[in-house]
């Protein structure tokens, strides 16, 4: 295998138009991953995407593409409900797979997907891989070092949900009239769309969760896009509560509400017996935490004094792939995840941002929805 | 050693053990190289409390019991400085490798005896502070050697006591682990800012400029009484010492260990020459780049050039006293892999010679010629 990998992109919707296609069109990306085919169920959209971004071939069907094109890896960027089917088709053809968040709509799908991955001996990366930005291992090290003591409680914060008003949905061409209604159907909703960033980040720092409970309701029960209306199938106002295996109890939120002036989107706060850790700045394009503060005091009295008041910060360019043109484009974290998969393939090693953590997060989301439906706290079955 | 893992005994469960040694060595990532086998402390209940908190296998009240029954391969002496020589000697005689927290001993004669005894018994000694391990000092050394400040004329460094130890963590709490008494810092033998703080500066200056040939000094006890938790402690260790250093050929230096006030950094000296100056991390006002500069500058809080130390990775970057952990791991690597270290007992002995000779010069009024090198 040459060091330049051949890839196919499945799904030419919003994230592909705004993020994946522009990033992979950059000269430095083409030296690693060459996009040779795009697939979209809407033929015009596939054709126009191929033309606009200089991709050799276009298809309306994944299986068809796989039989007619020789690729090393497949990028699954479809609506969440179609991740499983497309990823399984790619793995069955022996391809490495990148799956946009969230990896699957259900835990059962995730289990089957990882089993298929292992049986086929291919590599899989699932977004979003916070570990690929250096503040995440730093925060994990701060917690692991015991500097702020045993973590009692914490919060994560990622507001917003709703896609009707994005630029790619308000035009007349096949590339700008992309239907967002799948976000409101079963298998989607704010948790796998938005809250997942918080869940990936929190589990990257604190490890696995053992119990989940949640409250949720429908704040905007009917959504309208152009001439279509839909009664939403998934709660769009959710607060969930996770108890980590370490004992830390942390909140997550998925709701289409207004923004905070003080708390950065994608932020998190952890509070331990000796002090606290709070994210103070998040890059809005990637969701990567750029800065965090560690502050001592309280808890066991004088013990927190050694913690002091420490500010940690990393520029976005601390990520080796976030350089040059990529800094100007949206959804940079997807590009980083894809490059991580490419590196793992070329170096023949296990990828970071692997599927086990993504499966655990899928289960957290599934358990939150079960808890909303039943009023019962759920015990998780997976770990990572 | 079992399975090539060093079984370490921690001697003293005071401030440095609790702030640095125990938290670092209880991290899971070092378990393949070193384990906390035993801890001892003469204060009733303190060793047991520390052992429980940090997962140390055995706790002892008596050091002799730790040596005899603790099943340790090596010890780190985290006791008052005045006890280091006797405790070090006992450990070496028992066939244990020894890490000395600074300062190794208070006299050259003691240092000589330990170094000879260690050779005879075939055990290894590592002495803190391992300033010679820091890349920044080697860069400064190379810059001066290559003429970056022209002909060097003089250098300065030093540190001040203030009330650092009275206010320190683990001394002002309520339980057995947080009521550690600092009074020994103000008493002979081993008290005073030279053995406690200026020792860093002297390791730095000698790493950069090499061994010193002569010293003279003035020295006294300026603060006659110190208060800790409402009790007044009379002081007899000198707390105000100014030392002049002579490297030969007219290159001089000033090192101080004072009760209060300072003009130079404890860890980064000032070097003056005919072509400019290196002050702290800057050459003529411009930052000096060195191996590990980026890592050191990622470190939040106090800027202590600790992240560039080779073992300071992962969780260790967020635990205090990273240089102490580094020095212990230098001993661990030396014993396990026969990798020698720059944190040598010989370098420590030379710095002890500077301090001991300075006190003698102050007492006699005679400039002293040093007898050691490294």
Image (cartoon, coloured by chain):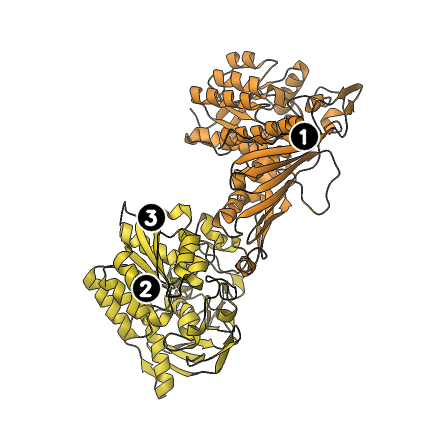
Chain colours: A orange, B yellow
CA neighbours of label 3 inside 10 A, class few (<14), some (14 to 19), many (20+): some
Of tags 2 and 3, the one toward the viewer is 2
Q: Residue at x 41, y 79 (%)?
A: B237
Q: CA distance from mark 1 to mark 3?
A: 46 Å
Q: CA distance from mark 2 to mark 3?
A: 26 Å
Point out the image quarter for the C terminus of chain B: bottom left
- Residue B62 is labelled as 2
Callout 3: residue from which chain?
Answer: B
Q: Residue furthest left?
A: B120
The picture quadrant where one finds residue B138 is bottom left
CA neighbours of label 2 inside 10 A, class few (<14), some (14 to 19), many (20+): some
- Residue B33 is labelled as 3
Q: Residue at x 59, y 37 (%)?
A: A242
In the image, residue B337 lies at what x, y percent?
28, 50
CA neighbours of label 1 inside 10 A, class few (<14), some (14 to 19), many (20+): many
Q: Residue furthest front?
A: B44
Callout 1: residue from which chain?
Answer: A
> How many numbered circles are shown?
3
Q: Nearer the viewer, residue B315 or B369?
A: B315
Q: Can residue A331 be spotted in the picture?
A: no
In the image, residue A6 lies at what x, y percent?
50, 23
Q: Secondary structure at mark 1?
A: helix
Q: Secondary structure at mark 2?
A: loop
Residue B195 versus residue B328 in the image, above or below: below
Asked if disc 1 and disc 2 are in contact, CB closer than 8 Å, the reply is: no
């Amino acid at each position: 295998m040459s060091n330049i990998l051949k890839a196919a992109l499945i799904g030419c919707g919003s994230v592909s138009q705004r993020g994946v296609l522009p990033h992979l069109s950059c000269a430095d990306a083409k030296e690693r991953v060459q996009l040779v085919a795009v697939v979209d169920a809407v033929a015009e959209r596939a054709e126009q995407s191929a033309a606009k971004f200089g991709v050799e071939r276009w298809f309306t069907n994944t299986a068809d593409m796989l039989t007619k094109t020789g690729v090393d890896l497949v990028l699954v960027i479809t609506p969440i409900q179609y991740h499983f089917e497309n990823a399984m088709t790619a793995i069955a053809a022996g391809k490495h797979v990148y799956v946009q968040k969230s990896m699957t709509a259900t835990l059962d799908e995730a289990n089957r997907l990882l089993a298929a991955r292992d049986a086929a001996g291919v590599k899989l990366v699932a977004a979003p891989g916070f570990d690929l930005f250096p503040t995440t291992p730093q925060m994990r090290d701060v917690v692991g070092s015991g500097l702020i003591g045993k973590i009692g409680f914490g919060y994560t914060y990622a507001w917003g949900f709703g896609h009707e008003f994005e630029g790619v949905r308000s035009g007349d061409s096949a590339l700008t009239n992309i239907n967002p209604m799948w976000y409101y159907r079963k298998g989607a909703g704010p948790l796998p769309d938005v809250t997942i960033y918080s869940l990936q980040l929190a589990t990257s720092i604190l490890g696995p969760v053992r119990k989940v409970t949640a409250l949720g309701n429908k704040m905007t029960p009917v959504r309208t896009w152009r001439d279509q209306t839909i009664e939403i199938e998934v709660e769009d106002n959710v607060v969930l509560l996770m108890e980590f295996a370490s004992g830390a109890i942390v909140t997550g939120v998925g709701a289409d509400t207004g923004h905070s002036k003080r708390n950065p989107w994608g932020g998190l706060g952890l509070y331990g017996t000796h002090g606290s850790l709070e994210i103070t700045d998040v890059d809005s394009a990637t969701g990567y935490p750029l800065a965090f503060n560690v502050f001592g005091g309280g808890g066991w009295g004088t013990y927190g004094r050694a913690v002091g008041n420490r500010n940690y910060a990393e520029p976005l360019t601390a990520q080796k792939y976030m350089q040059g043109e990529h800094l100007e484009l949206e959804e940079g974290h997807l590009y980083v995840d894809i490059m991580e998969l490419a590196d793992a393939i070329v170096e023949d090693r296990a990828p970071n941002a692997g599927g086990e953590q993504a499966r655990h997060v899928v289960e957290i989301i599934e358990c939150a929805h079960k808890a909303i439906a039943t009023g019962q706290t759920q015990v998780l079955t997976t770990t990572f | 050693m079992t399975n090539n893992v060093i079984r370490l005994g921690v001697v003293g469960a005071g401030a440095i053990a609790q702030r640095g040694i125990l938290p670092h060595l209880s991290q899971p990532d070092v378990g393949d190289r070193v384990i906390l086998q035993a801890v001892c402390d003469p204060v009733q209940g303190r060793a047991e409390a520390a052992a429980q908190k940090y997962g140390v296998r055995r706790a002892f009240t008596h050091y002799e019991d730790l040596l005899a029954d603790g099943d340790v391969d090596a010890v780190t002496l985290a006791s008052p400085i005045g006890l280091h020589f006797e405790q070090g000697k006992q450990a070496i005689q028992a066939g244990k490798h020894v890490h000395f927290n600074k300062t190794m001993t208070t006299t050259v004669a003691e240092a000589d005896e330990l170094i000879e005894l260690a050779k005879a018994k075939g055990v290894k000694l590592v002495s803190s502070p391992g300033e010679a391990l820091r890349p920044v000092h080697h860069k400064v050394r190379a810059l001066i050697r290559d003429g970056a400040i022209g002909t060097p004329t003089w250098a300065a460094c030093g540190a001040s006591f203030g009330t650092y130890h009275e206010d320190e963590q683990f001394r002002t709490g309520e339980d057995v682990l947080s009521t550690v008494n600092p009074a020994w810092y103000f008493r002979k033998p081993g008290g005073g800012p030279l053995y406690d703080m200026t020792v860093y500066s002297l390791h730095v200056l000698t790493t950069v400029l090499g061994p010193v040939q002569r010293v003279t000094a003035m020295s006294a006890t300026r603060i006659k009484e110190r208060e800790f938790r409402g009790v007044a402690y009379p002081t007899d260790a000198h707390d105000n010492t100014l030392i002049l250093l002579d490297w030969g050929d007219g290159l001089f230096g000033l090192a101080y260990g004072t009760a209060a006030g300072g003009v130079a950094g404890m860890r980064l000296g000032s070097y003056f020459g005919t072509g400019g100056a290196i002050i702290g991390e800057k050459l003529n006002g411009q930052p000096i780049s060195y191996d590990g500069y980026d890592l050191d500058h990622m470190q939040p809080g106090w800027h202590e050039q600790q992240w560039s130390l080779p073992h300071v990775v992962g969780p260790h970057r967020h635990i205090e006293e990273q240089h102490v952990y580094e020095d212990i791991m230098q001993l661990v690597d030396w014993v396990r892999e026969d990798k020698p270290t720059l944190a040598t007992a010989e370098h420590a002995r030379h710095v002890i010679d500077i301090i001991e000779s300075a006190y003698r010069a102050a007492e006699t009024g005679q400039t002293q010629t040093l007898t050691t090198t490294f």
